[in-house]
Amino acid sequence: EIVMTQSPATLSVSPGDRATLSCGASRDIGHNLVWYQQKPGQPPRLLIYGASSRAAGIPARFSGSGSGTDFTLTIDSLQSEDFAVYFCQHYNNWPPWHTFGQGTKLEI
Amino acid sequence: EVQLEQSGAEVKKPLESVNISCTGSGYTFSGHWIAWVRQTPEKGLEFIGIIYPGDLAVKYSPSFEGRVTISADKSVSTAFLQFSRLRASDTGIYYCARGADYYDVWGPGTLVTVSS
């Protein structure tokens, strides 16, 4: 099983700042990496798939990069609505053993 | 609008079973995989299993195989999760989500509480 490790666990930033979140895979996963945003009381929301492609309706201030074992989610010019928990997820086409990171909480 | 709706919160005792439903609307339900994912305080987000309503192909995570049954009825655009022999550590929010690799639409979640 591939283990996904996110860092830091909590990131304290201010509105207008840039936030850089990291996700590492225990072995090479190519570009099979997604990022989700989750706010309290809501399900996760898809942000990035294929490591760097923005999902429909996601603002351009969200960007993803990386391949292999090291991935980054960058949020430019943080808005108040961006303060949430962010998860990365690895996916296989088959078998679908999809594993999630433990999350990074973005706080003011 | 593409939506997934889930059945309501459940309170169960240890060793009981729970059944959760997930109804899709706004898209061709039979043409998209539906995954079940749970979120618990201890383990965070965990993939449980996945079904293709079109032909009922199902795959389970090894972590849950044996305690979980996933099914679907495409005639009513609904997928089902049955979780048996519940333990206190199974307490959490159970989500259905659309997608084979990653999930672009999520249900609101069903809170399952297991307590004696």
Image: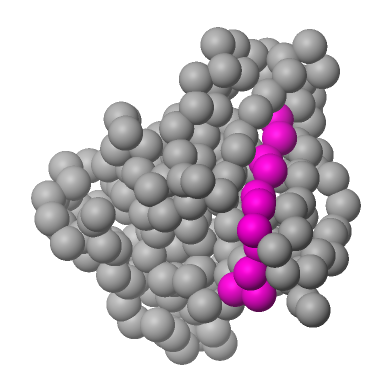
Examine the rendered structure and indicate whether residue B54 appears above or below residue B105: above
Residue A54 relative to residue B71: left or right: left
Q: Quadrant of residue A5?
A: bottom left
Q: In which quarter of the image is residue B14?
A: bottom right
Residue at the image position 45 percent from the left and 32 percent from the top: B59
In this orientation, which residue lies closer to the viewer: A41 or A107? A41
Residue B46 relative to residue A22: left or right: right
What stretch of residues is rendered in magenta?
B79-89
Residue B107 relative to residue B48: left or right: right
Tell me if residue B2 can be seen.
no
Residue A38 image point, x, y percent: 59, 63
How many labels sit on residues? 0
In this orientation, which residue lies closer to the viewer: A84 or A57? A84
Examine the rendered structure and indicate whether residue B95 appears above or below residue A32: below
Residue B43 image point, x, y percent: 48, 71
Quadrant of the image containing the C terminus of chain B: bottom right
Residue B86 highlighted magenta (yes or no): yes
Residue A56 image point, x, y percent: 54, 35
Residue B28 relative to residue B34: left or right: right
Tell me if residue B88 can be seen.
yes
Q: Name the colour scheme.
A: one colour
Quadrant of the image containing the N terminus of chain B: top right
Residue at the image position 29 percent from the left and 63 percent from the top: A4
Residue B35 highlighted magenta (yes or no): no
Residue at the image position 22 percent from the left and 64 percent from the top: A24
Residue B92 image point, x, y percent: 66, 67
Residue at the image position 50 percent from the left and 61 percent from the top: B45
Examine the rendered structure and indicate whether residue B78 appears above or below residue A72: above
Extreme residue in the right direction: B8
